[in-house]
Amino acid sequence: MRSNSKPALTFANEALSLNAKERAAIKKEVEIAFDGVLAALRIDTEHDHNTRETAKRVARMYVDEIFRGRFHPMPKVTEFPNVKKLDEIYTTGPITIRSACSHHMVPITGIAYIGVIPNNKLIGLSKFNRLTEWVMSRPQIQEEAAVQLTDLIESLINPRGLAVVIRAKHMCLTLRGVREQDCEMTTSIMRGIFRESNTSRNEFLQLIQ
């Protein structure tokens, strides 16, 4: 018997990690729905050569690019033992941030810095970039995205100290509303030694200046 139930809905910033067939089905749904949006905006997509394939392009863009972290699986992350018992701070950044505001679906762009005091496990440097891109490529608010990213890294390597700082501009401020071009939001999350020790926290903050 065919089920008439609709697919379950989730929060905007949750990771669904769908397979290729599931993503193709969602792209088709989005294409049809966005055709309706364009029609509601009184755009003649049938005869306007500039918007004839727009719905299909938008569907592809949202599922495979802008919201890639929602629909595609998490990138593979290989862990390595901390053989040399490294216990000093290392940082990586600036890592490019590309996201979208879940309130208005317009871009959030900026940079992230990550600081680690390792414990027993390490991951490759590029994996911080890939994990950041995966978490940020969803409809987000910056405060929750920073927590998601920190929680994910912490679950993978269980470091003695972990710091994540994100600085970003939100086009819901620059394109609409107050239209403030120079306004930037900074979120800072400190875990472990970075939270407990002013010395370690200040050293990290100095390193990323």
Image (tube, rainbow, N blue to C red):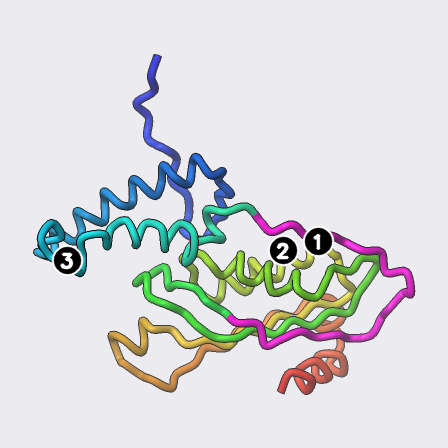
Residue 155 placement, left or right of 107: right
Point out which mark residue 49 bears: 3
| Labels 1 and 2 touching (C-beta < 8 A) | yes
Residue 187 placement, left or right of 26: right
Q: Which residue is more in the foreground, 207 or 202?
A: 207
**Whether residue 7 is situated above or below residue 118 in the rendered picture:** above
Point out which mark residue 152 bears: 2
C-alpha separation, residue under disc 2 versus residue under disc 3: 44 Å
Q: Say which of marks 2 and 3 sits in front.
A: 3
Residue 28 placement, left or right of 140: left
Q: Secondary structure at mark 3?
A: loop
- Mark 3 Cα shell of 10 Å, populated few (<14), some (14-19), many (≥20): few
Which segment did they paint magenta? Answer: 74-96
Task: Please say whether residue 70 is one of the residues in the magenta stretch.
Answer: no
| Labels 3 and 1 touching (C-beta < 8 A) | no
Tell me the quadrant of the picture where the C terminus can be found.
bottom right
Amino acid tagged 3 = His
Point out which mark residue 61 bears: none
Residue position marked by numbered label 1 in the rendering: 156
Image quadrant of residue 164? bottom right
Residue at point 23% right, 45% down?
33
* Residue positioned most to the top: 1
